[in-house]
Image: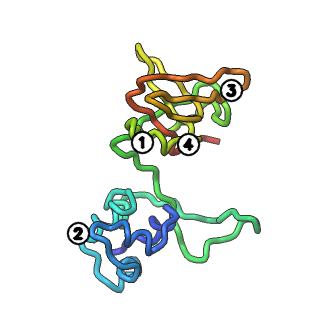
Amino acid sequence: MLTRIREVRKAKGLTLHEVAARCDPATTAQTIGRLETGTRTVSVGWLNRIAAALGVDAADLVTMPGRPDVPVAAILSGDGATAPRRPQTLLPPAPGSDMIGIIVDVTQGDYRSGDALWAEKLAPEHFGSAVNRDVLVPRPVGRFAFGRLAATENGRVQLLPLSPGARQQVLADVPWIAVVRQLIRSL
């Protein structure tokens, strides 16, 4: 079976050691390397363990017929555009169960009209992990606030506006926030 473990791991910016430590139960970097290169047979159990460690579906780790892959033609770096050293593919975006969508109708800050944002819902105990990130915050009667999370304190969140001249907002008793994780923009 052809796997894409290495491609997914590199796309996530993780080392062999980091993936091995994230496995449940933890394993060695050498084992992950052997599974990536095919020198060790990959079972369904290993696919599930590694997929969980990488935060993807097990199906994302195998080459599947009928699923189009997007080949990487170039890598943009400080030295300009260069061809990858070995074939690579881009992972298609895959929503998690806690993702919600946001459509930008009017340009705000760095977001342009027509952009689609994928945001991950966070419970109050995880708000601190979203400081200095753009978030959507629910308000009463089906309204929302959107901005940069400046701070969380005593059940309140402080949002900085994305548009110049707007005022900071402080919202209390927020049940959840959604932190922007991915921007999809048509050019």
Of 111 and 163, the residue lying toward us: 163
**Residue carrying label 2:** 45
Question: What percent of the width, then of the height, locates residue 61?
Answer: 37, 65
For the question of whether residue 121 can be seen, the reply is yes
Dot placed on the residue nearer the N-terminal end, 3 or 2: 2
Q: Identify which residue is drawn at 59% across, 35% down.
A: 150
Callout 1 crowding tier (Cα within 10 Å): few <14, some 14–19, many ≥20: few
Q: Amino acid at mark 3?
A: Ser
Q: CA distance from mark 4 to mark 3?
A: 18 Å
Q: Amino acid at mark 4?
A: Leu
* Image position of 152 with respect to 142: above or below: below
Asked if the residue under mark 2 is in contact with the one under mark 3, i.e. CB atoms within 8 Å, the reply is: no
Left or right of 115: which side holds 143? left
Question: What percent of the width, then of the height, locates residue 24?
Answer: 28, 66
Asked if the residue under mark 3 is in contact with the one under mark 4, i.e. CB atoms within 8 Å, the reply is: no
Quadrant housing the N terminus: bottom left
Quarter of the figure with residue 170 = top right
Of 174 and 28, the residue lying toward us: 174
For the question of whether residue 4 can be seen, the reply is no
**Residue carrying label 3:** 163
